Amino acid sequence: MPGPLNGTAPGTTADDLPRSWREALPGTSRRGFLAAVGAGSLAALLAACAPGDTKTGSSKPTGPAKRGGTLRVGTPPPPTSVDPVTAYDGSAVALIQLVADYLVWLDKDFGLQPRLATKWKSDKDAKKWTFTLREGVTFSDGAPLDAETVKASFDRLLDPKNKSAALSAFGDILAEGGVTAPDSSTVVFTLKRPYVDFPYLVSAGNYNTVILKKRYKGDFTKPHSAIGTGPFVLTSYDASKGASFVRNKRYWNKGKPYLDGVEVTFYRDEQADVAALQSGDIDTQFLSKAQLVKPLSGSGDVVVDEVKSTNLTLFTLRTDQAPFDKKEVRQAVAYALDRSALRKGIGSDIGQLGNDHLFAPAYPTAPEDIPQRAQDKKKVKDLLKKAGVKHLRFTLTFDEPGKDYAVAVQSQLKESGITVDLDQQPSGKFYGGDQKKDTPWLFAAATLVGYAGRPVPSQLVAPLVTSDAIWNGAKYSNPKVDKAAKAYDATKDEKERAAQARIIAEALHEDVPVIVSYWGGAVRAYNSTRFTGIEAHPSQFVDFSGVSKA
Amino acid sequence: MTRFLLRRLAAIPLTLLVVSALVFTATEVLPGDVARTVLGREADAAAVTDLNRQLGLDQPVLVRYVHWLGDFVSGRWGTSYTRHSDVRTLLLDRLGDSLLLALAAFVLLVPVALGLGLLAGLYRDRLLDRVISGVTLALGAIPEFVTGVVLMVVFSVNLHWLPTSARLSPGEGPVEMLRHFTLPVVSLVLLCTGYVARHVRTGTIAVLEGPYVRAARLRGHSERRIVLRHVLRNATVPATSALGIQLQYLLGGLVVVELLFNYPGVGDLLLRSALDKDLPTLQATAMVLGVLYLLVVLVADVAYRLLDPRVRLGGAVA
């Protein structure tokens, strides 16, 4: 499974820069600081000065696209090196997506779009997948794209030596040696187990799977090594300042991109990034944050595009030890939460309510008729009584991005007489330690962990709630769920898949190893007077090939 | 004077050794794991162990410290763990930018603070003094991130007069640099002026009450000549150490202004490398900033000696 585009704040992806901001100011709490200079004041000031109606929504190019222009983008500097093989943070992934392309693109509605592959099919077991490559595609240096190159790209990701961030996504599905190239335009993937959603694993949804040259040796910050088949070509990169790109004249999609180039500026501080957007110093952002840009929507020229996503803050309860070894206690916590308030207050009023199973409404297979769980204080009381718990008190462990969510949970549960002790840890400690023995994010009694969106639900179900799964912090084990999860991956019949999805969802809803109070959304803000065709993406991915001057 | 200088210069390496040991110890107790930062929280555990071994992080602290110290002294500052780039290039590049901003602020700070302090002292307890003292004191109490944001909202976001970023775009000349630097420099000067001006004001008042000023007045010298020849120089003495302190702050403590005005400098580098446990970068940055600090203190002391003959001649300060 791809990493969660870095440690994630509720409903957001990428960038831990706010942390640096805050830690630069000893003695200033985040809350106080934000109140003083943050979204609050800036946004309020800006909104107060702004005339006009609220403009929210995507802009569709009308009429023939105008050519030319350089799009200026602000983003946090990638915290680690920009290398498609190991990258896991949002800025690095976006920079790579300007230059390199996937076999298949993941569109904003979780659909798959042919890119370097024009079609794909599987055998009847969904174990052998055949992809046909697009004819006439060349890399920006003129080298042609062929099946051997594609094979080399996947071999690179599958070799454990290369420490690819995609390794965990391929997991027990695709291993080294599973990729062959029978002829120059055909690539065959032979899986270890049936997996109906496999095209998602070789799409942008598994964001490390861009197709690179055979001799790629790492480092995507040098123009001579950053060679791809994407819409733009890297011309310069400065780890402190930013990066410049020009239009790829050899791009396979003739006529595109419309832009002459893209100029990326790194902003260490998210407020500075937003101010730059407001003042017109930049035109858009890779990783807009709803809580920062939504208040600016309609003030001046800024427009905020919004999409459903599958980002979530997972509230995990350890099912193998007191007090959460009793199902009723877990259910009580779930019924004590005011989900709408969390979605509104913490989730910036975007996204949809969660129902404690891992099938987001955005997924096509999500079961629709499981009753929505809502706050019910009487039920909380009854459930706790039934479990024989007089006074429920537990410690909630989380790191900085989960802080606001944690405080809200604490005060909501207090209304039902449940005491929550907050244990905020530095991210390094929270995710540190032995991942199999004692790391807090997987071993504390109750935790909050942000996850970036996954393109398919099985990428949440399998690693989070099946027995002994890698990120099963709940230590949940239910043979019924394990079996249904396997069957879901192996069933091509849509009806049968829906049935398996229902089994999983009902079990999770009933057993509550994890609480999903709301699913996040994603936004992208841009200056509508200068450019059109900029859209939000559930995973904040970037496709600027269709962007043109307004 | 020469002996004084030599003695002070000799103490610098010793101080730096202590600094390096402290920084090394401090980073050891910081939570977190370099390899996990580089590879991401969901990276394979074996890959994390493997990378830690590659970076030599499985070695005992003392071994790593001695290795690092040897390398540092011989000019090999290593490669950043997280950025995969040469630490010296990275650091010197950032340092150059930081010094430019710090010096720009300092160059504006000196005349402004001296002028205002002198005026306040000359017009002691009158309206002008009250206004100067009150306003500079108030501004000194407001953190630069507040003044900075206000300035930015007014002059960049609303009026569109000045850019939000202090960073020059490629191909921009000195005029553009002035535009980029105006907001950060002004917010720094607003912050630092009060402290220095207060010292100058106190110095001015003390000098005006001194016997030689009275003597000069009795001799019939013009007020202008008294101020320029006697008051200014003597009132500056107590301000040198205050200016020294502000310069130290400007050289190493601009993290907030650098962040706000998106000016990647050495403060940001120090902060980031500490958060990521990027030891090569952190150590080198701490050492270089240490050297700068010590040099500033030395310069301030030398200036103090040159300005005040009593100290210069080794006599007691009355």
Image: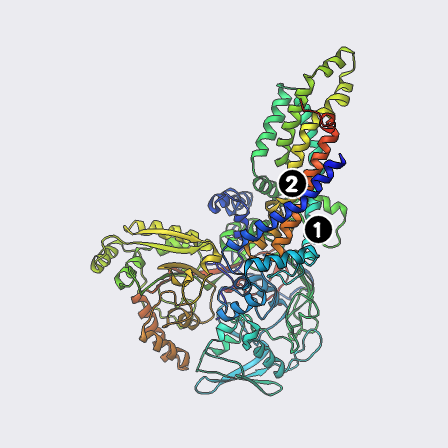
Q: Position of residue A392 (x, y in %)?
A: 27, 54
Q: Is residue B183 visible?
A: no
- x then y, percent, for residue A408: 38, 51
Q: Amino acid at mark 1?
A: Leu
Q: Quadrant of residue A519?
A: bottom left
Pointer 2 residue? B248
Give A219 or B3, whichever is nearer the viewer: B3
Taking the spot 77% from the left edge, 22% from the top edge, the residue there is: B229
Is the image coloured rainbow, by chain, by secondary structure, or in one colour?
rainbow
Q: Which of the two discs, 2 and 1, sits closer to the camera? A: 2
Which residue sits at x=76%, y=19%? B226
Mark 2 burial class by Cα count in 10 Å: few <14, some 14-19, many 20+: some
In the displayed image of the protein, which residue is found farthest to the bottom?
A182
Q: Could you tell me which chain the residue with mark 1 belongs to?
A: B
Circle 1 is placed at which residue position? B168
Q: Secondary structure at mark 2?
A: helix
- Left or right of residue A468: residue B81: right
Q: Is residue A469 left or right of residue A73?
A: left
Residue B116 % position (x, y)? 67, 27
> Is residue B244 among what the camera can see?
yes
- For disc 1, the neighbor class at 10 Å (few under 14, some 14 to 19, many from 20) is some
Q: Is residue A146 above or below residue B164?
A: below
Mark 2 vs 1, N-terminal side: 1
Question: Considering only vertical position in the picture, is B51 above or below A405?
Answer: below
* Identity, as a three-letter code, of the amino acid under mark 2: Gln
Identify which residue, B237 or B67, lies in the foreground: B67
The image position of residue B50, as x and y in percent, is 54, 69
